[in-house]
Amino acid sequence: MTKLTFLGTGTSQGVPVISCDCDVCSSADPRDKRLRSSALIESNGVSILVDAGPDFRQQLLRAQVKQLNGILLTHEHKDHTGGLDDVRALNYTSGQPVDVYAEVRVQQALKREYAYAFAEEKYPGVPEFNLITIDENPFTIKGVTVLPIRALHHRLPVLGFRIGRIAYITDASYIDSREKEKLHNLDILTLNVIRRTPHLSHFSLPEALALAEELQPKQLYLSHLSHQIERHAELAATLPHNVAPAYDGLTVFSHT
């Protein structure tokens, strides 16, 4: 059994957006309170985090996460890497660096952003990362196979990930036919949807629905949702039976 917990389902600004009083940002429905996108995948006792944005600390405390066997980074943008300083707590309790799986380009960005963590003479207590290079080829984390999915975020190459029959893709606007072959026979597919109308670097709702129609997962969840799409309850009422907006704290399972 593989378990997916949505730790955050919002876009780069989160929802509500600072200083905005639109219907979505002022909603009283807790499902409309969206931290920056991140997910926890648990399989065979192995805990894997996908992305560690600025809300990392809050998300791990809320989900009562005690240990991580690895962090997968989809790309280097701040809303997906901005919380990595807080791995210090995990370093302290485990006595070990945290394994961070990322492409070479993303690692270079981390070394710039967190230069103090990679300095020759480190200040005591800085976060400890063990950077592990990945690409489109499968790899394992403590016996759990991870299959990367190449996508484009406008022109920026990003990675989604498949573990078992669960696939999680965020910040994508295009997936080519070869990579789509990796996304068949899924129980659960997560896709980013920022709004209904076209967007330069993210799937729109019609694009995500068309992709799901092509791939035929048993269930599609929509994440990385912005305040430019309607509130959770209103959005859910318009979707096909096997499509749902994810929300922070939602947990779903693949039993195969």
Image (spheres, rainbow, N blue to C red):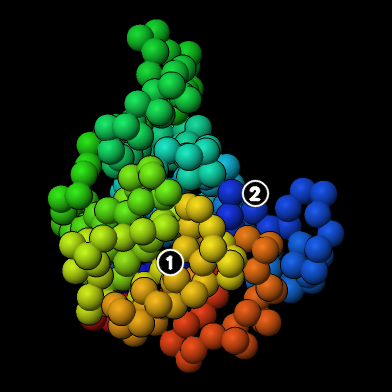
Residue situated furthest top in the rendering: 121
Front-most of residues 120 and 115: 115
Q: Is residue 27 left or right of residue 146?
A: right
Residue that mark 2 sits on: 13
Question: Alpha-carbon neighbours of circle 1 within 10 Å: few (<14), some, or many (≥20)?
Answer: many
Residue that mark 1 sits on: 191
Report the amino acid beneath label 2.
Answer: Gln
Question: Alpha-carbon neighbours of circle 2 within 10 Å: few (<14), some, or many (≥20)?
Answer: some
SS of the residue under disc 1: strand
Q: Where residue 141 sits in the image (x, y, percent)?
A: 21, 51
Q: Where residue 153 sits in the image (x, y, percent)?
A: 41, 50
Q: Is residue 8 above or below residue 240?
A: above
SS of the residue under disc 2: loop
Report the amino acid beneath label 1.
Answer: Leu
Q: Where residue 146 sits in the image (x, y, percent)?
A: 22, 57
Q: Is residue 107 above or below residue 64?
A: above
**Residue that appears at 32% across and 67% down:** 167
- Say how many tags the image has: 2
Marks 2 and 1, Cα distance to the nearest angstrom? 18 Å
- The tag on residue 77 is none
Q: Indicate which disc, 2 or 1, sits on the residue closer to the N terminus.
A: 2
